[in-house]
Image (cartoon, rainbow, N blue to C red):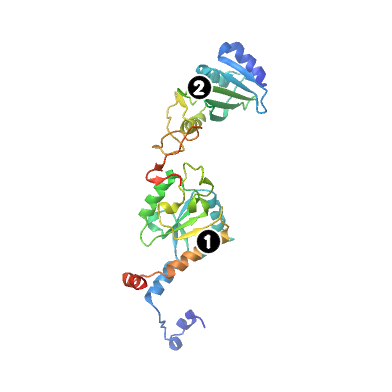
Amino acid sequence: MGLLDRLDDPYEGGGIILGKVEDLLNWGRSKSDWYLHFGLACCAIEFMAMNASHFDFMRFGTIPRTSPRQADFIMVTGTVTFKMADRIKILYEQMAEPKYVISVGSCSNCGGPYWEHGYHVLKGVDRIIPVDVYIPGCPPRPEAFEEGMMLLQKKISHQAIFNKRKRLESEV
Amino acid sequence: MLPNEIYDKLKTEFGDAVIEFDNKQPTDSFIVINTENLFDICHTLRDKNEFLFDYLMCLSGMDLGENVGVVYHLYSMTHKHKLVLKVTAPKTDPRVPSVEMIWRTADWHEREAYDLIGIQFEGHRNLIRILCPYDWEGHPLRKDYEAPEYYHDMKVSY
């Protein structure tokens, strides 16, 4: 019998679920991530396939936002040039905490094919903003996007909200 | 009209300003013209009824070592004929007349050639960088270009 079925029957289940508030909050946070999409190159083309009905990115609870202030994570898809790097940093700083970053594709992971002669390319977006999930590929297949999104959800659902400092100390 | 016919007509009209005609290359045959007369020749090519080159297909900058060069690919929608023009300028003083007033397409193309090769197009009304950031130093597609070590505190190469 599922959790929601028991809620429907107040006499049998009593309408009560025992659990941690933190788990509930993290469940909500991880299942409705709005993202600021930063389409910079061909990875963004692959991301269009991800957004279309066949792979249906929105079933992860993600909604594309055009404003960084409404976004939970930023999706950097493509080559980060120095001209764009300044802007990415500004937009990342405008996002409200908690905020996450997914770096998609070889270019934004490490510079990719521009490693040797790319005078204009930042060698990895993680050199200016902290990255939570790296999705490898050139460009990655939509399945890789799905796995990256699931990894981010996993990360968010295991994060500490209360007594963060105390728990971090105990881990050390 | 074929390029050699156009060359003959230009030669009679402009004389020494039209330097040479080359059809020995595997690419399109081209006409090399004197840099100072570029604007007048292009104006004639666009407006004279027998030429009517109303479309500038491409404008490219080149680094030739000692010199820089500009290549113009022209097309006439009316007569359906093509022409390739080339000009050069010394790298120490890379000034070439702008054709931005003749073909509006040249606006961005010339800005690109200025940005990446460093050709100064004289008469262009808005000659600023188009691809690199405005505060970028140097012209990256020159053969002797060396990338900076840092840009805005971001390391360029590792």
**Chain under disc 1:** A
Percent coordinates x, y for residue A42 in the rendering: 54, 49
Q: Quadrant of residue B130?
A: top left
Percent coordinates x, y for residue B17 in the rendering: 55, 14
Q: Residues within 10 Å of mark 2 (few under 14, many from 20)?
A: many
Nearest to the observer: residue A115 or residue B130 = A115
Q: Nearer the viewer, mark 2 or mark 1?
A: 2
Residue at disc 2, secondary structure: strand
Which numbered marker is on residue B35?
none
Q: Quadrant of residue A170?
A: bottom left
Nearest to the observer: residue A117 or residue A90 = A117
Instruction: Mark 2 vs mark 1: tell me if same chain.
Output: no
**What's under tag 2, amino acid-wise?**
Ala
Percent coordinates x, y for residue A120 in the rendering: 46, 42
**Chain under disc 2:** B
Residue at disc 1, secondary structure: helix
Q: Is residue A110 above or below residue B62?
A: below
Which numbered marker is on residue B89?
2
**What's under tag 1, amino acid-wise?**
Phe
Q: Circles 2 and 1: CB distance less than 8 Å?
A: no
In the picture of the structure, the residue carrying the numbered disc 1 is A57
Nearest to the observer: residue B143 or residue B70 = B143
Q: Which quarter of the rendered picture does the C terminus of chain A lie within? A: bottom left
Specify whether A49 is left or right of B96. Answer: right
